[in-house]
Amino acid sequence: MRPVAPHSRLAAHGLALAAVTTLVLTSALAVPAPRPTQAQTPPPAEAQPTPPDPALLPLDVQTAPPPGTPRTQGADQQAQSQKVAFDPSQGLPQWLHGVQDVSLWSGGDPTASLVETVPAGAAFLKPLGPFGDARVEVYFPGDDKHAAAQAWVDTSAVEPSSLPTWLSPTAAPGPSLSLPAPPQRISDDDPPDVTALHIAVIDEASGQLLYGLDPNTEVPQASTTKIATTIVALERSPDTSRRIKVTVSATAMVARDGSSTMGLEPGRSVTLDTLLHGMMLPSGNDAAEQVAVALADSREQYVQWMNDEAAALGLKHTHFINPSGMDADGHYSSAYDMAMLARYAMRNATFRDLASSSRYSSDQYSMLNLNRLLGVYPGADGVKIGYTDNAQKTIVASATRDGHRVYVSLMHSQDLVGDSTRLFNWVWSTFQYL
């Protein structure tokens, strides 16, 4: 046997030691690490700087992800949550709601003056149609602190909204104003027997139906139609002092269909205020027709505005064919819808004055209100009566007691004053406001 050199033995020992070391390390790595118990916490990862939340950055600092970056569910949700500016050129919704305090401007141009500022929570606005580069014309129905107004608002301050729930307790959930609780029933007395076939009794503050008898049946509504004709006029032309050249003939209308009129004849000039009183007090069909052709490009356009109004108010059982209320196929409403329409219109101070006026004289016209409850029933303050062969007698009556207003809407009645009186008396004795 050849003797091994010392340096060869050292090399062999080194290889053996390396092999053993490798085996030990491999075995150690193969053993799973113990799982932490509840009392244990994994070692913290290397600290990384926390990026700022893009939603909290100013708009000019927010950045989009680099091109090609895959979108995750979280990124999609973030994109959906970011507000998109309201663009009226893409179509007008039925309602707008403030995303911030909303300034009401006198016009659509930058030189317009500030009329009022409405807090975002109260800013429910109905678009009227005209719009510019940065503003849209709207009607603000008003509230307890702010008067109703036609104005222009910045498109950046509003967003499309669903039907405000203050218009109806049955409206879809959405931004809303808090409403008072409805009155509580304190008596088991049955509602009185009346002659009306369709009844809706509505509390104004809460919008609650206190009593109904076939309240949603679609029937001819006669001249209660003029509630819609009048509020549409006030929304789109609030300057009631404007003068209008008369083109409608009352004589011709009476000869044609026996219309009730205020006595208009072509060639005269009257204020819009006179025409509105002519509609609401003596229930002039000539006044309704004159308002329609004077304020819109056509009578058909005005009637479309009335139907747009019904849709915006969530009136599901209402459709208009004419501005006066004359019987016509497809011209109908319900006791409930007409009460809710009146409730909305009475938010407008000018409408309230019209509805409660017993008499009016101007432009050589003298008029008396055909609503016989005014001045007879305590607290009666509106709204409108009607009559046609098909509708028979109709009314939306309002009365206020101790600061609370209630509406009684009757369709196909034989005794408007008697029916309304009995129902109002029943409400005051049966319900209590807290």
Image (cartoon, rainbow, N blue to C red):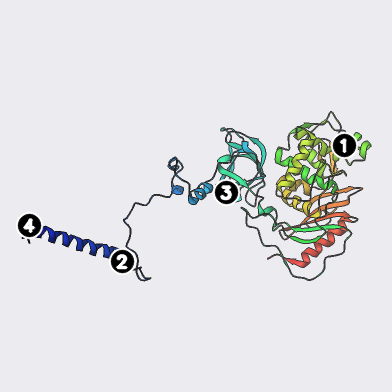
CA–CA distance in space, label 1 to label 4: 134 Å
Compared to 413, does 67 lie above or below?
above
Out of 52 and 133, give the one closest to the viewer: 52
- Single out the mark in the foreground, 3 or 1: 3
Q: Identify the mark at residue 7; answer none if there is no mark.
A: 4
Which label sits in the foreground, 1 or 2? 2
Q: Viewer-proximal residue, 86 or 251?
A: 86
Residues under numbered marks 3 and 4 in contact, where contact means CB atoms less than 8 Å apart: no
The alpha-carbon separation of the residues under discs 3 and 1 comes to 46 Å
Q: Quadrant of residue 239?
A: top right
Q: Considering the image in quadrants, where does the C terminus appear?
A: bottom right
Q: Which tag is nearer the camera, tag 3 or tag 4?
A: 4
Q: Earlier in the sequence, mark 1 or mark 4?
A: 4
From the viewer's perspective, tell me whether residue 132 is left or right of residue 334. left
**Earlier-in-chain disc, 3 versus 4:** 4
Q: Three-letter amino acid code at disc 3?
A: Ala
Element class at badge 4: helix
The disc at residue 263 is: 1
Q: Answer yes or no: do the residues labelled 1 and 4 have beta carbons within 8 Å?
A: no
Label annotation for residue 120: 3
Which residue is pictured at 67% across the width and 50% down the height? Answer: 163
The residue furthest right is 255
User: Who comes first in sequence, dot 2 or dot 3?
Assistant: 2
Q: Which residue is mark 2?
A: 31
Image-quadrant location for residue 185: bottom right
